[in-house]
Amino acid sequence: MRLSNLADYAVITMSQASRHCGDGRVSAAELASETGLPVPTVQRLVSKLTSAGLLRSVRGAGGGLQLGRPAAAITVADIVEAVEGPIALTACIDHGECDFEVGCTMKPHWPIINDALRSALADITLAQLRDPPPTTPDSHTTIRERAA
């Protein structure tokens, strides 16, 4: 499973926008320059993120973009859902369409799995993404290796 490039770029764009919290506002062109993403892509993301209330556009002198709410109140789940829609691993949950619905024993379990995934993404805030993660001696080991 992978996020789409657009969802990935949305997280990058929001993370960069959060770095401007103390400075006031930032333009889409500045975000594109700072992230290395193409301006049209950032503009498309800004439109989606603004519609979702994650960014706010301020017009006039000194205008630009700013976070729609504090960075600590914006999660990775919020950002992904703004771009991708509801977090669901299978199409049958989103669209109710499945060629194997009759006799499917998994359908009742997918909402539990989807909720766990969304919850994990909702536990990571934009404020946490502003700074590099702390490094520890075992930061390159996998979760399974640490559990063993």
Image (cartoon, rainbow, N blue to C red):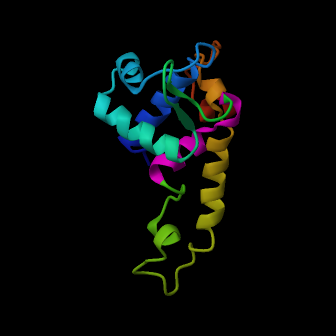
| Chain part drawn in magenta | 71-84
Which residue does the image show at 63% across and 12% down from the upper left? 137
- Looking at this rendering, what residue extends furthest in the front direction? 60
Whether residue 148 can be seen here:
no
At horizontal 49% and vertical 29% (from top left) the residue drawn is 59
In-front residue for pair 130/121: 130
Quick one: 13 or 97, which is closer to the camera?
13
Residue at 63% from the left image edge and 14% from the top image edge: 22
14 lies above or below 62: below
**In the displayed structure image, the side of residue 20 where residue 71 appears, left or right:** right
Q: For this view, does 85 lie left or right of residue 129?
A: left
Tally of numbered discs? 0
Residue 47: image x %, image y %? 43, 42
In depth, the one of 63 and 117 nearer the eye is: 63
Q: Is residue 125 left or right of residue 79?
A: right
Q: Does 1 appear above or below 90?
A: above
Q: Could you say where residue 112 lies in the image, as x and y percent from the top left?
A: 66, 62
Q: Is residue 6 visible?
A: yes
**Residue 116 higher or lower than 112, as above or below:** above
Quarter of the figure with residue 114 = bottom right
49 sits left or right of 111 in the view:
left
Residue at figure coordinates x 39%, y 21% from the top left: 35
Q: Position of residue 67 (x, y in %)?
A: 59, 30
Outermost residue, bottom side: 102
From the image, give the main secondary structure of the stretch colored magenta. helix
How far from the left and from the top, in percent, is residue 24?
58, 17
Given residues 1 and 60, the one toward you in this image is: 60
Q: Is residue 67 magenta?
A: no
Figure check: 78 above or below 96: above
> Which quarter of the rendered picture does the C terminus lie within?
top right
